[in-house]
Image (cartoon, rainbow, N blue to C red):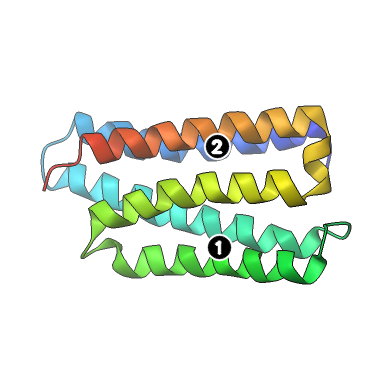
Amino acid sequence: MNLKTKKILGYLGLIPFMAFSFLPLLSPFPEGYVFTLLLSFYGAVILSFLGGMTWGWENAHNHKLSLIIGIFFSLIGFFIISISNMFLFYSLCLGSVSFVGFYLFELRVSDQMRDRGYRSLRTSLTFLVTICYLNSIITFSW
């Protein structure tokens, strides 16, 4: 897949993060809570997807360990979904930390990150997703 397609898909995938993180500012409870819950669910699904990407990293350093860590991130995504309804604030915090953690893992292990354009895209997307999470964490109402 070429970089242009990756950019289009990456930024389209960012739209729900932005919507679910900023719509609660405009909506009272319970709608605002539902949007925040959807942010947690959507982020967990995307995190699981990112973890699954490690299966395609043929030239990753220590391929077995990369697969194990990728599955770990997928399991974190599942865990976030399973606790979101009862512990939404904590699931948002875990989601935020996990996206940054996966980015750092990918930066160190994935050969794709050697491509300047791809690395720039992943940096931008991770930064913007983290901003969305931080907005939701800061404005979270118990």
Residue at mark 2: 126
Q: Would you identify the image quadrant in which residue 41 lies?
A: bottom left
Q: Is residue 14 visible?
A: yes
Residue at mark 1: 73
Furthest residue in direction right, as rendered: 59
Which quarter shows the N terminus?
top right
Q: Say what amino acid the circle numbered 2 marks.
A: Thr
Q: Is residue 43 left or right of residue 20?
A: right
Q: Position of residue 35 (x, y in %)?
A: 28, 45
Q: Position of residue 85 (x, y in %)?
A: 24, 63
Q: Is 124 or 6 nearer to us in this picture? A: 124
Q: Say what amino acid the circle numbered 1 marks.
A: Phe
State if disc 2 and disc 1 touch (CB < 8 Å). no
Q: Is 28 or 44 nearer to us in this picture? A: 44
Q: Is residue 32 left or right of residue 69?
A: left
**Residue at 83% across / 33% down in the picture?**
115
Q: Position of residue 105 (x, y in %)?
A: 65, 51
Q: Is 47 or 90 nearer to us in this picture? A: 90
Secondary structure found at label 1: helix
Residue 57, compared with residue 64, is above or below; it is above
